[in-house]
């Protein structure tokens, strides 16, 4: 069986950046399982998974635009320390939730200067090309329940 819309696919991966540094990997753990065609993995990788089958190994290069998007400078802001009520020690790398016109979103602290805190709402991999080493480990037809819920159930997926 090949990966196509409404199939459940499982794969092991190692994600590296342009410098070859490992960013993430499923090595030593469970493969990543997803419902193909539902946008559960970055678009550029999902396109390259199409038509692959169990045992296929390949390298997928994904542009920033087809990965986590281009870096948007307007999503990086400086906010007053007073916006972090009840938090005395704010450090770079800390993540917080913020409220905006489109609802709740995540921000990461990138720098602290006196009473100013620099935060960035871009995904940490925004603006970066992604390089995946992939090994497809399973492909199966999605169940009616998985299709109606929009996600995988059972091993490697979501449980109710």
Image (cartoon, rainbow, N blue to C red):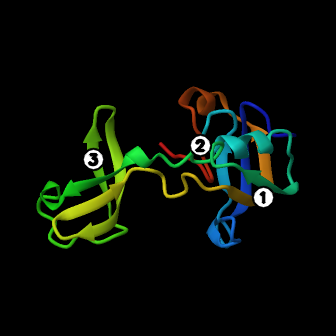
Find the distance from the CA under tag 1 to the CA under tag 3: 35 Å
List x then y, in percent, for residue 23: 61, 67
Report the front residue among 31 and 100.
100
Circle 2 SS class = loop
Closer to the N terminus: mark 1 or mark 2?
A: 1
Closer to the N terminus: mark 3 or mark 2?
A: 3
**x 54%, y 31%: residue:** 149
Q: Is residue 139 left or right of residue 24?
A: right
Q: Is residue 11 above or below residue 41?
A: below
Q: Is residue 43 above or below residue 60?
A: above
Where does label 3 land, which residue? 98
* Callout in the foreground (3, 2): 3
Report the front residue among 42 and 138.
42
Q: Quadrant of residue 25?
A: bottom right
**x 47%, y 42%: residue:** 160
Give the crowd class for mark 1: few <14, some 14-19, many >=20 residues within 10 Å.
Answer: many
Where does label 1 land, which residue? 134
* Callout in the foreground (1, 3): 3
List x then y, in percent, for residue 114: 18, 70
Give the crowd class for mark 2: few <14, some 14-19, many >=20 residues within 10 Å.
Answer: many
* Callout in the foreground (1, 2): 1
**x 69%, y 71%: residue:** 19
List x then y, in percent, for residue 110: 36, 65
List x then y, in percent, for residue 128: 61, 56
The numbered disc on residue 153 is: 2
Find the distance from the CA under tag 3 to the CA under tag 2: 31 Å
């Amino acid at each position: 069986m090949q990966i196509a819309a409404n199939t459940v696919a499982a794969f092991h991966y190692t994600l590296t950046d342009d410098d070859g540094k490992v960013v993430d990997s499923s090595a030593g753990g469970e493969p990543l399982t997803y419902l193909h065609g539902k946008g559960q993995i970055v678009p550029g990788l999902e396109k390259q998974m199409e038509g692959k089958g169990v045992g296929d190994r390949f390298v997928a290069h994904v542009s920033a635009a087809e990965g986590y998007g281009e870096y948007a400078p307007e999503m990086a802001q400086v906010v007053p320390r007073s916006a972090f009520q009840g938090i005395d020690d704010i450090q770079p790398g800390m993540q917080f939730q913020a409220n905006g016109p489109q609802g709740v979103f995540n921000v990461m602290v990138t720098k602290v200067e006196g009473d100013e805190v620099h935060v960035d709402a871009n995904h940490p991999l925004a603006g970066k090309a992604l390089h995946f080493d992939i090994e497809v480990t399973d492909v199966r037809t999605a169940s009616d329940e998985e299709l109606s819920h929009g996600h995988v159930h059972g091993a490697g997926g979501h449980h109710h």
